[in-house]
Amino acid sequence: MKLPAISPLQFRLKTLGPFRVPEYKGSLFRGGFGHFFRDLICVTRAPDCKGCPHLATCPYSLIFESPVLPEHAVLRKYPHAPHPFVLVPPLDPRTALPPGVDLCMQVTLIGPGIAYLPHFIRVFDELGASGRYGGRFSISAVTSAFGGRDVVYDGGTRRFLGSPMVWQLPPPNGPVQRLRLHFITPLRMRTGGRYNDSPDFVAVTHALLRRLHLLGALYGGMDGDARWMHSLMAQADAVVTERADFRWYHWERTSGRDRRRIAMDGVVGSLEASGDLTALAPCFRVGEWLHVGSGTSMGMGKYTMDYTS
């Protein structure tokens, strides 16, 4: 398994006035990001990106639209390429916030997406200043989301103080026999063509491995050979789901193009599994940053993992 470089970051925000937002803020932040990013970058001013001659080089297209290009043979069965970022909105459940509240948004940049950090900062600066998405806010700082939490960008002085750190997979720590996943944001995934309201370990693992395979092939220099993935899927099939405790989480988003309401329901909760999990544990450790299922650019499919020997 060869994965792309990933840089998990925290955008530390502060509300500058009354802030009225949904309980789950993924669509709000991701939608605002896309709108301001396109306004900042687009040179054609066309109403949409379909057929644009700049698709292969435009930062907005590569980051937010992520088109399937002819050289992406691994995506021949997929309508869209996975985005080179994961955006987790502030998880404060309050819907009305006063001025002066500190919020934290997590952004994991993937592969070539790391080079576009200045775009992310400028876009969220303008989004926050506009007040059009819930209210006004500012960026206090951008820090690494792991390790020493080094400051990468100081919002007060508007200066970069360092380069974003690249996360490294920690070395293995012995055999793994039991694993627990706790889903913090809604997990939305299909199994057998239907949305799964009580996924087991096998379904979650297969979805995660497919995501890692696509990200590795697109952004990590993998050649598209899926044998490593099939081998781990076979190992996952022998793992026993000991407990799956999920509840349905209902939320909707508004389509930015035609203003339709779109259901984005998923499940939150936890599952526990037992078996030979040693080879699979590193994949789940990476998945803590990269998430699983659909809607990852809105923060969906975020989980934490615990395991024991």
Image (tube, rainbow, N blue to C red):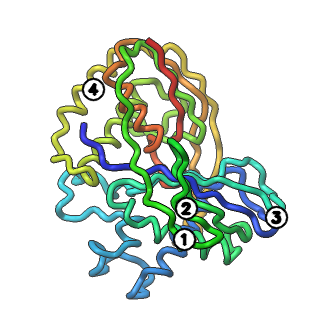
| Residue 72 spot, x, y in % from top left | 21, 58
Question: Is residue 261 visible to the viewer in this orientation of the structure?
Answer: no
| Residue 194 spot, x, y in % from top left | 45, 38
Mark 4 in CB contact with mark 2 (< 8 angstroms):
no
Q: Earlier in the sequence, mark 2 or mark 1?
A: 2
* Res. 99 mark: 3
- Of tags 2 and 3, the one toward the viewer is 3
Q: Amino acid at mark 3?
A: Pro
Determine which residue is flagged by label 4: 232
Q: Earlier in the sequence, mark 4 or mark 2?
A: 2
Determine which residue is flagged by label 1: 159
Q: Residue at x 38, y 88 (%)?
A: 44
Rendered-image quadrant of the C terminus:
top left
| Residue 171 spot, x, y in % from top left | 35, 28
Q: Residue at x 78, y 57 (%)?
A: 101
Label 4 sits on a secondary structure element that is helix
User: Between marks 2 and 3, how big is the CA–CA gap?
Assistant: 22 Å
Determine which residue is flagged by label 2: 30
User: Between marks 2 and 1, how big is the CA–CA gap?
Assistant: 24 Å
- Of tags 4 and 3, the one toward the viewer is 3
Query: Looking at this view, is 23 or 105 the one in front?
Result: 105
Snapshot quadrant of residue 59: bottom left
Q: Amino acid at mark 2?
A: Arg
